[in-house]
Image (cartoon, rainbow, N blue to C red):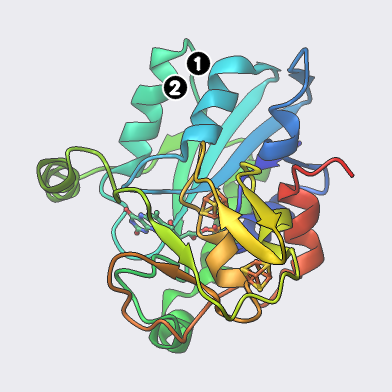
Amino acid sequence: MVFYFTGTGNSLYAAKYLDEERISIPQAIRRENPVFRAESIGVVCPVYGHEMPSMVKDFLRKAEFRTGYFYLILTYGRIHGGAAELAESFLGSCGKKADYINTIMMVDNFLPGFDMNEQIAINPEKRVEKHMVSIKMDIDGRKRYKQPVSEEDRDWHQAFLDRTAGTLVKKPLYYVTDECIGCEICTRVCPAGCIRLEGRKAVNTEENCQMCMACIHHCPEKAIKLTIPEKNPDARYHNEYISLTEIVEANNQRTE
Ligand SMILES: Cc1cc2nc3c(=O)[nH]c(=O)nc-3n(C[C@H](O)[C@H](O)[C@H](O)COP(=O)(O)O)c2cc1C
Ligand code: SF4
Ligand code: SF4
């Protein structure tokens, strides 16, 4: 059994490789009694500012895992900043412990930092599949391991905290342009359910926004923009092996 959180599909791609029984965290977090039993249970999610998304943390606080083997896989784009150690420490704060924590470097979907076309072009160098094969072998063999973290990794995280005081981006983070055609895709890919249509135009309330950027990356008209400079406002990304339908199934919070 593997739980996953994804904005642009990288973490779902990894989760699909690791286990056939997959459960989306934005759906699972709504369960009344989140107690899960399986021989092996994993969580796969991206890192934001080297840490897990707030919804994943909320889920980890709430859920009870009855399992003989618990693992965490963190996807990231360029600098993990000691994500394994930060995740281990977070788990400790809610009375949980992982047998295995590792990271996988994939396309970096952080629009203020990266041009998505360049990210896609350099993706083969990251050898994603090779790393996934090795992580799957570890997990299937029930290996106990935490990715080592260096002083340099910790310095990256400290520099990030000093620079941002832990707040990645200030709100409002997005605006919707007149290019919006009211297709409602953004309202369905949002794991926090914070976008709605007013008239024929999307409005992002950013309430409980996870900053996953799914809304921006999946908008067919590129009508959602950041209020801070983007490296390339015309380039967007989604994992090539994950369909829009899968992202909607994972994240949709609409009931009708
Ligand atoms: C708000 C935000 C913050 C991010 N912070 C980091 C980071 O600190 N380090 C990093 O290497 N990648 C960072 N990324 C990149 C993602 O972790 C990476 O692209 C991840 O694989 C996306 O997973 P997904 O496709 O499942 O959403 C960030 C992305 C976003 C949207
Ligand atoms: S996905 Fe884009 S075009 Fe569609 S409703 Fe949202 S902002 Fe408008
Ligand atoms: S508003 Fe956009 S960035 Fe925020 S949680 Fe929803 S999809 Fe993700």
Q: Which mark is residue 80?
A: none
From the viewer's side, name the closer residue of 97 and 156: 156
- The answer to whether the residues at label 2 and label 1 have Cβ atoms under 8 Å apart is yes
Residue 83 in percent (x, y) is at: 34, 43
Residue 138 in sight here:
yes
Along the horizontal axis of the image, is 191 left or right of 86?
Answer: right
The reply, left or right, for residue 154 in relation to residue 212 is: left
Classify residue 167 by image quadrant. top left
- Residue drawn at the location 41% of the way across and 81% of the way down: 233
For disc 2, the marked residue is 91
- Asked if the residue at label 1 sits under 8 Å from ligand 1, the reply is no
Q: Could you say which is closer to the camera, residue 189 or residue 12?
A: 189
Name the residue tied to disc 1: 96
> How many C-alpha atoms fall within 10 Å of the one at disc 2: few (<14), some, or many (≥20)?
some
Q: Can residue 108 be seen in this view?
A: no
Helix, strand or loop status at disc 1 = loop
226 to 96, vertically: above or below: below
Total marks shown come to 2
Front residue of 152/90: it is 90
Badge 2 marks a residue whose secondary structure is: helix
Q: Quadrant of the C terminus?
A: top right
Amino acid tagged 2: Leu
Three-letter residue code for mark 1: Lys
Left or right of residue 174: residue 32: right
Residue 223: quadrant of the picture: bottom right
Mark earlier in primary sequence (2, 1): 2
